Amino acid sequence: MISALMDEALEATVSNSRIVVRKANMQDIPALLELINGYAARGIMLPRTEFELSENMRDFTVAWDGKRLAGCGALHFYSPTVGEVRSLATAETHKKHGVGRLIVESLVAEAKTYGLDAIFAFTYVKDFFAKVGFYEIERGELPLKAWKDCLRCPKFQSCDEIAVLRVLQPERWQQRHAIPPVLGIEDGMFVILPTVRNAGLPVDL
């Protein structure tokens, strides 16, 4: 398990590569800037500055294949019970090789370590998130604070992202949000919420 409280790393073999997934450190910033802002230049992600990454470095998890950054993702806390998966990106050289899944699994483990009830994301690739246990939801189900990054997004007035959610503690989540019972899910891992057409992560993870 990836723990936010310990300097642990997960190694996995993905498509003939040895991928190491770990919490990020300051030495990762140049590679993170290149990866994230490369997508931002294409309008897929929000750009990040060196200052922003430094300020939020403890949110980030990275996946390295030798000396190459294969992918990254961040878990940002919004309340004692809810967090957001954001800045999820996979390098062009490692798309469709399972790197995105490794990163999300690490972020989920971290969320469980901190006792979160649920995690959400805004994404263009809902099919990927469906494969890792997330469900499309109404944006109104999310805390208003989750939209603060939207204010500086060029697509703010015409957003085409999807909101997705993964519930980690169904009983606590249901008690706090008065949502319907979990439907057909073993072990109480996930819950299906109402869906809408319309929430920031890149493609082909």
Image (cartoon, rainbow, N blue to C red):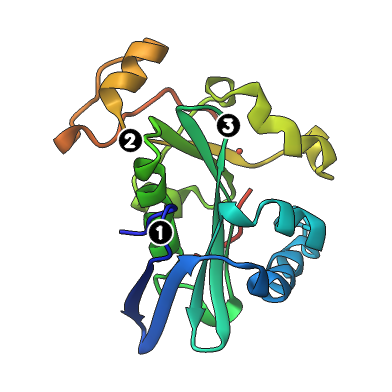
Could you classify mark 1 by the number of other residues whose Cα lies within 10 Å: few (under 14), some (14-19), or many (20 or more)?
Answer: few
Looking at the image, residue 73 sits to the left or right of residue 185; the answer is right
Disc 2/disc 3 C-alpha distance (Å)? 15 Å
Nearer-the-camera pick, 47 or 57: 57
Residue 78 tag number: 3
Q: Amino acid at mark 3?
A: Tyr
Residue at image point 39% right, 57% down: 106
Q: What percent of the width, then of the height, locates residue 193?
A: 39, 25
Q: What percent of the width, then of the height, locates residue 121?
A: 54, 42
Disc 1/disc 2 C-alpha distance (Å)? 21 Å
Q: Secondary structure at mark 2?
A: loop
Residue at image point 19% right, 34% down: 185
Q: What percent of the width, then of the height, locates residue 138?
A: 53, 25
Disc 2 target residue:
168
Q: Amino acid at mark 1?
A: Met
Q: Amino acid at mark 2?
A: Leu
Residue 106 tag number: none
Q: Is residue 49 above or below residue 32?
A: above
The answer to whether any part of residue 49 appears in the image is no
Q: How many marks?
A: 3
